[in-house]
Amino acid sequence: MQKIRDDYPDRRIIGFFYDPNIHPYSEYYLRLLEVRRSCEILGIELVEGEYDIDSWLKAVRGLESEPEKGARCSVCFDHRFERSAKMARELGLELYTSTLLTSPKKSLKQLEISGQRLAERYGVEFVAPDYRKASGTQEQNILAKDAKLYRQDYCGCIYGLTMQREEQDRLADELSSPISRQIQPESIEERIALYEHRVELESRGIQYRIIKERFLNYRLLSATLRVRKEVVPSHILPYSTMKKSFTRGRIEYFIGELHYMSRDEVKFISLQSYNQLAKREYSSTTELIFDPPPFEIELSIRSEIIPSLYDLSTIIVVDEIPTAKIELLIDSKVYDDVRERLLEIDLV
């Protein structure tokens, strides 16, 4: 946007955010948040298009397995450029362009063909400058770092994301959220909270820095506890893992509030003990499942139960400690990850 403003100083510049290809909506919102901030900094008017993801999914149907820069991308460009060209005409503008042209992962030729074809249909002109050349991509990276911009690591498309995560052998955790709505580490929801807080700090003139840290991340994908083959409500504490996804056994003994199962280092605590540790008053484990305390509080509860920082044993909260045979199925992931942290700077 800075380059366009420099190259077209006498033109009226309007930003148009139309990205129904971005999935999930929380990621769409996070990117919109950054575009709003950028436009405010640059003094550029912004128009938000409709998030009509159903029309986009219909447009690319049958092309789900296409690679990056393939036929699906062409259809995606056509779909979005048509709305952009139409919007330019409605606003009385003669020219339109796209920030997609700055992406090193997109084909300039593919973008130019699509942009020009839709421009002719709506009687406007598509401008396709190459701001990547002459170290342009490196300049982008420096600018983004200096401006503390959110840097997404996938185009936004659900199909591109899935293939990219499979190639990286990474969990596509962007596509899932816990039923409890608890904000998970390095989730889109955590990023939204961070960048919304960043906007608040800037509005108050408070200095800050966004840092990155490497950490051990965790996701619970599913869990089922059966006692006498009947499913029992159970709440699994963070960083609970098992060597295999299934185990069975009985409670052998207890030490304090912690009850030990006979196999696979599985441990139980009662809801009463959990309430005392969490300083809460849950009436049932089912209530806890759907409305748990923040992730960090549950980590502190775990550290009180098991002081060792390296213990990944499964810890389960139940209404009453089971006395009969237990069957447990858990699918969880522990993996190396990187997250962002926002630190306020005290300028004393």
Image (cartoon, rainbow, N blue to C red):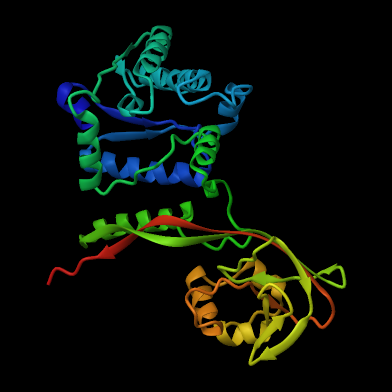
Residue beneath the point at 24% across and 59% down: 209
Looking at the picture, tell me which residue is in the foreground, 56 or 220: 220
Q: Residue 225, position in %: x, y? A: 76, 68
Could one spot residue 338 in this view of the protein?
yes
Residue 125 found in image quarter: top left
In the image, taking residue 288 as reference, residue 73 lies left or right, namely left
Could one spot residue 93 in this view of the protein?
no
Residue beneath the point at 29% across and 17% down: 128
Residue beneath the point at 56% across and 85% down: 277
The number of numbered discs placed on residues in the rendered structure image is 0
Q: Quadrant of the C terminus?
A: bottom left
Q: Quadrant of the N terminus?
A: top left
Above or below, 345 relative to 2:
below
In the image, taking residue 63 as reference, residue 250 lies left or right, namely right
The outermost residue toward the bottom is 256
Q: Residue 318, position in %: x, y? A: 72, 77
Above or below, 272 relative to 235:
below
Looking at the picture, tell me which residue is in the foreground, 173 or 281: 173
Q: Residue 118, position in %: x, y? A: 42, 12
Looking at the picture, tell me which residue is in the foreground, 193 or 13: 193
Above or below, 34 relative to 259:
above
Q: Residue 153, position in %: x, y? A: 40, 41
Residue 202 found in image quarter: bottom left
